[in-house]
Image (cartoon, rainbow, N blue to C red):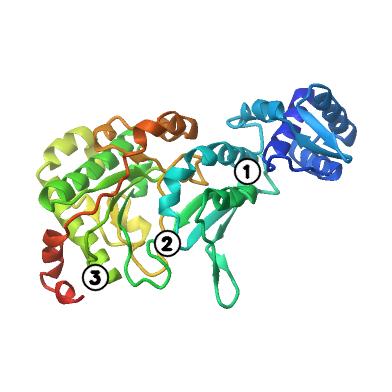
Amino acid sequence: MNKNRVADHILLLLAIKPPGKLVELDHILDKVKRNSGASREEIFSNLKDLISQGLVGVKNDMYFITDSGRDKAWNLVYDPDMVLSYRLVLLARHYYPKICELILPFLKDRPVSVVKVFSDERDPIHKIKPIFSRYRKMKPRSYNFVNSCEELLKYVDIHAIDFIPYVHKLRQNYPDWLVIDIDAGDEIKNAGQSGFALIKEVVKETYIVARDQLHLNPYIKFSGSRGFQIWITFTQKLGGFDAYRKAISVIRDLVEDALKGRYDELKEKYGTLISDPLTTSTVAKKEKRRKQILLDPSSMKEEGDVRAPWSIHHKTGLVSVPVYFSDLENFTLDFARAEIVLERRAQLKDAFKLEPSDPSKLMKLIGKGSLLYFIE
């Protein structure tokens, strides 16, 4: 057993605990043995070494990580030989206190789904066991609310790293945001950089259609995985949830029309990835849209939820970071790493201001052929 690795497992375990949290020896022995395979004697020997180095402290026969130990543990956050769930929680513990004021407006005064991450017992190093919590199953329902930075960090204390608010406030019959979730079929996703570039082409076209044809104020954010979202707010509501889903269908039709005029150009760049039609707003089975890019209206419903801007995606550890339109073409996944987002915080803080738009033109298009325009 590599002695330094046992010490690293101890540091990482203690680093995910809240500051000042005292941890029993049996807990350390149990978790580190599971994660590293070390014997009780090896773990205890490494624990004593960490204490002598000032990286771990002892109080009332219980253990805690010191500030120096926490700094050293941060070096393990991207170490693939360390427990994945611990690394994600450590990342969240480092990240959210510094970004809280930016994410909080998207969480306040509405139910929030949270994703807690724990270790997969069979493979704690490489896999997580996510627990998706929308509300506690009791009568009446007890929702998660995050109305302050203190409340946000309390959720991080219990291993919540991903924050997914409802698109509407409690008992409100329409969404506060029009959210167009732009996600590619498997054949495009699996095409590497070429597929990612094609997704960005559709994001760009959707943004331009919303801005230039519909005179709206669209905002872009990365999903935290492989897709993007465009968010728009309005000076008045469009109607009920159906009106917002209809709006996405209308926008998709305009986007597809714009893309058709570029099919020859796109085929030269992306070859067989280009299909006709390239986009859809119909949430069909995945195999039916393997070569299409979905402008997904699914979150536009009662209790629909969407990952908050600035939230960490629990599957990737990447941030669902806002993206300026001018930065879209050069955007790579590295721009969504938590430490890069923190470095660019001042530059990005206005990238998702969500200035409301006049929906008049969009409402006229929604109203054609339906009664939606005349309701409300």
- Identified at 41% across, 51% down, the residue is 105
Q: Which image quarter is the C terminus in?
A: bottom left
Q: Nearer the viewer, residue 268 or 159?
A: 159
* Residue located beneath label 3 in the image: 239
Can residue 43 be seen in this snapshot? yes
Q: Nearer the viewer, residue 272 or 79?
A: 79
- Could you classify mark 3 by the number of other residues whose Cα lies within 10 Å: few (under 14), some (14-19), or many (20 or more)? some
* Residue located beneath label 1 in the image: 85
Residue 15 drawn at (x, y percent): 69, 36
Q: Nearer the viewer, residue 104 or 331?
A: 104
* 38 sits left or right of 86 in the view: right
Residue 247 drawn at (x, y percent): 21, 62
Question: In the current view of this chain or complex, which residue is farthest to the top?
Answer: 53
**Residue kind at label 2, given as amino acid type:** Tyr
* 307 sits left or right of 274 in the view: right
* Residue located beneath label 2 in the image: 166
- Could you classify mark 2 by the number of other residues whose Cα lies within 10 Å: few (under 14), some (14-19), or many (20 or more)? many
Camera-side mark, 2 or 1: 2
| Looking at the image, residue 370 lies above or below residue 152 | below
Q: Nearer the viewer, residue 109 or 50?
A: 109
Q: Are marks 1 and 3 in contact (CB under 8 Å)?
A: no
Picture quadrant of residue 303: bottom left
CA–CA distance in space, label 3 to label 2: 17 Å
Picture quadrant of residue 11: top right
SS for callout 2: loop
Q: Which image quarter is the N terminus in?
A: top right
In the picture, the disc for residue 289 is none
SS for callout 3: loop
CA–CA distance in space, label 2 to label 1: 25 Å
